[in-house]
Amino acid sequence: YAKVSQCYERAAALGHAGARYNLGYMSEHGLGRAIDTASAIRWYSLAASQGHGKALINLGLLYAKAQGPLYNPIEAVECFRKSATQGNSRGQFNLGRMYAQGKGVPRDFAQASFWYEAAADQGYHRAQYHLGLFYLEGNGVKQDYALALIWFLKASVTGNMKASYQLGKMYLQGLGVPVELSEAFDHIHRAATHGLDVAQYRLGKMYMQGTAVARDYQKAFAWLAMAAEQHYRPALYAI
């Protein structure tokens, strides 16, 4: 990493945006150097000022999660807003999340849903999942189980295991669809096998209670133990 860093530094001194972005990334993650958030912000800022899209997103993320005086949610919002208005799906999603959490802006679920949908329409799975949650719970939009199901399906197809788990819950509880235990099991099992702790816990409970599967205490304990290993509190209590 040291030699690579030297090459990037020479290119950055000549104004190369990609090199400046890479130095920001290396400073953020401690590649070939100590982790230095202030330095990462400086390099990302230089690259972003040259129109580097990833640098602008990463700059916003750093401002949003930094500790101490570097924490600046207002600047994070501005980074995400600039990216979002340029049509970047990650910028749109992160701007929506800032509105949903009330960080750097007053909490506004309607604005959050607007930006989530903009990103979801471009196929960004995290936005699709969060938009599904909004429709499921009626946050910022009218509660609509059918639309929740559609967005969870879209996100699940692209590998979002939280969305797969939510699909399982909807089929398990009959939310907007008839209760279909085998369908519920398939979605929850898929999420559990991909390591989602809450799905592992739910699957363990299904085996314990004999829901959609034959009661099997050995399998129940195995799945609960997997969730407990990830410090999922309900699983720790269950075993």
Image: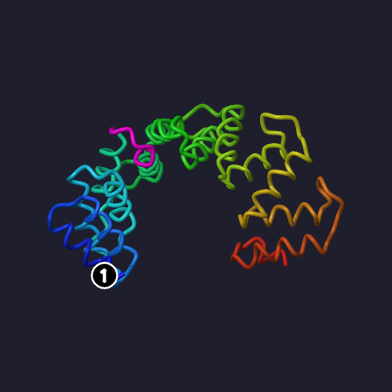
Dominant secondary structure of the magenta stretch? helix
**Can you give x and y, in whole percent of width and height, for residue 28 in the image?**
31, 63
Q: Nearer the viewer, residue 100 or 146?
A: 146
Quadrant containing the N terminus in the rendered view: bottom left
Q: Nearer the viewer, residue 142 or 121?
A: 121
- What span is colored magenta in the figure? 85-92
Q: Residue at x 77, y 36 (%)?
A: 180
**Can you give x and y, in whole percent of width and height, for residue 139 in the image?**
48, 35
Q: Is residue 56 left or right of residue 239?
A: left
Q: Residue at x 75, y 45 (%)?
A: 185
Question: Callout 1: few (<14), some (14-19), or many (20+) C-alpha neighbours within 10 Å?
Answer: few
For label 1, the SS is: helix
Residue sitting at the far left: 14
Q: State yes or no: residue 29 in magenta.
A: no
Q: Is residue 143 left or right of residue 94?
A: right
Q: Is residue 120 left or right of residue 5?
A: right
